[in-house]
Image (cartoon, rainbow, N blue to C red):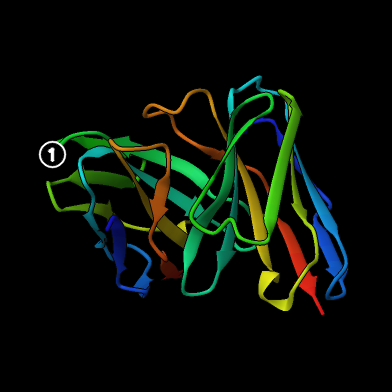
């Protein structure tokens, strides 16, 4: 298994509070991604990073920000959580962007009340 | 618009009953097509990458094939441990993004 951990694994929070999810990798891969998975939608890309301090938006980036200060860590922040952000969040890594496979972490289940 | 459609949404098979899952895609230049397996409460696990029409990959009871418009995941003589959701994703030549289908939930009954 690719060395990817996510924390926390489960979180319940209230509308309007800030939330930060962490992804940590031990593979020294250049690319890191954040996805959300919702019933009927499949996995959708939120943001991705192609290097330290280099990030770009994905398909569903509104309401989310990211930061990557070290190769191994990629943080996803919900500045003010809303109920529509209740979802399962997955981090993925790939060695390069070409046709390299993305390997996924175990996920974080976030519930916003 | 790049998109991926998987069918059927759900499939129930008897142990040993072979079948196929379909992934139809529309993409502006295919860079790669990816199959993943996802067990409940876990992240997707990589199975195969296919790059060009006519390509085939095999792993145990699974075989993936690719045409210019779709991919099939053939399951031969499935076992209960093959029960999972199977996800298909495509990557276009134009960018880094993967586009995922909504998956096929496979249940294999002993």
Crowding near pointer 1: few (<14 within 10 Å), some, many (20+)?
some
Residue A88 picture quarter: bottom right
Q: Which residue is drawn at 76% across and 65% down?
A: A110
Q: Where is residue B48 in the image (x, y as percent from the top left)?
A: 36, 39
Q: Is residue B83 visible?
A: no
Q: Quadrant of the C terminus of chain B?
A: bottom left
Q: Report the side of A85 relative to B3 (left or right).
A: right
Number of callouts: 1
Identify the residue position indicated by label 1 in the image. Answer: B53
Query: Residue drawn 47% across and 74% down?
Result: A40
Q: What element carries label 1?
A: loop
When asked about the image quadrant of residue B64, the answer is top left
**Vertical placement of A57 versus B54: above or below?**
below
Residue B1 drawn at (x, y percent): 27, 58
Residue A97 vertical position relative to residue A39 in the rendered view, above or below: above
Provide residue A30's location: percent of width, then percent of height.
Answer: 59, 23
On what subunit does the disc labeled 1 rest? Answer: B
Q: In which quarter of the image is residue B56?
A: top left
**Rendered residue at 78%/72% (across/down):** A111
Residue B12 located left or right of residue A67:
left
Relative to the observer, which residue lies in front, A106 or B110? Answer: A106
Q: Position of residue A95 (x, y in %)?
A: 52, 23
């Amino acid at each position: 298994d690719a060395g990817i951990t996510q924390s926390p694994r489960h979180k319940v929070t209230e509308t309007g509070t800030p939330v930060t999810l962490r992804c940590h990798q031990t593979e020294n891969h250049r690319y890191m991604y954040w996805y959300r998975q919702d019933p009927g939608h499949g996995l959708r890309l939120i943001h991705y990073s192609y290097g330290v301090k280099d990030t770009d938006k994905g398909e569903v980036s509104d309401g989310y920000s990211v930061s990557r200060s070290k190769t191994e860590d990629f943080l996803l922040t919900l500045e003010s959580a809303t109920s529509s952000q209740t979802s399962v969040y997955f981090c993925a890594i790939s060695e390069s962007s070409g046709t390299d496979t993305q390997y996924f972490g175990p996920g974080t289940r976030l519930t916003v009340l | 618009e790049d998109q991926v459609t998987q069918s059927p949404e759900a499939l129930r098979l008897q142990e040993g009953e072979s079948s196929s899952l379909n992934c139809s895609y529309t993409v502006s230049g295919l860079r790669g097509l990816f199959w993943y397996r996802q067990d409940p409460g876990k992240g997707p696990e990589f199975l195969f990458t296919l790059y060009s029409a006519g390509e085939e990959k095999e792993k145990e009871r699974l075989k993936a094939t690719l045409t210019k418009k779709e991919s099939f995941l053939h399951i031969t003589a499935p076992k209960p441990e093959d029960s999972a959701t199977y996800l298909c994703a495509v990557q276009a030549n134009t960018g880094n993004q993967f586009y995922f289908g909504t998956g096929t939930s496979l249940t294999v009954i002993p």
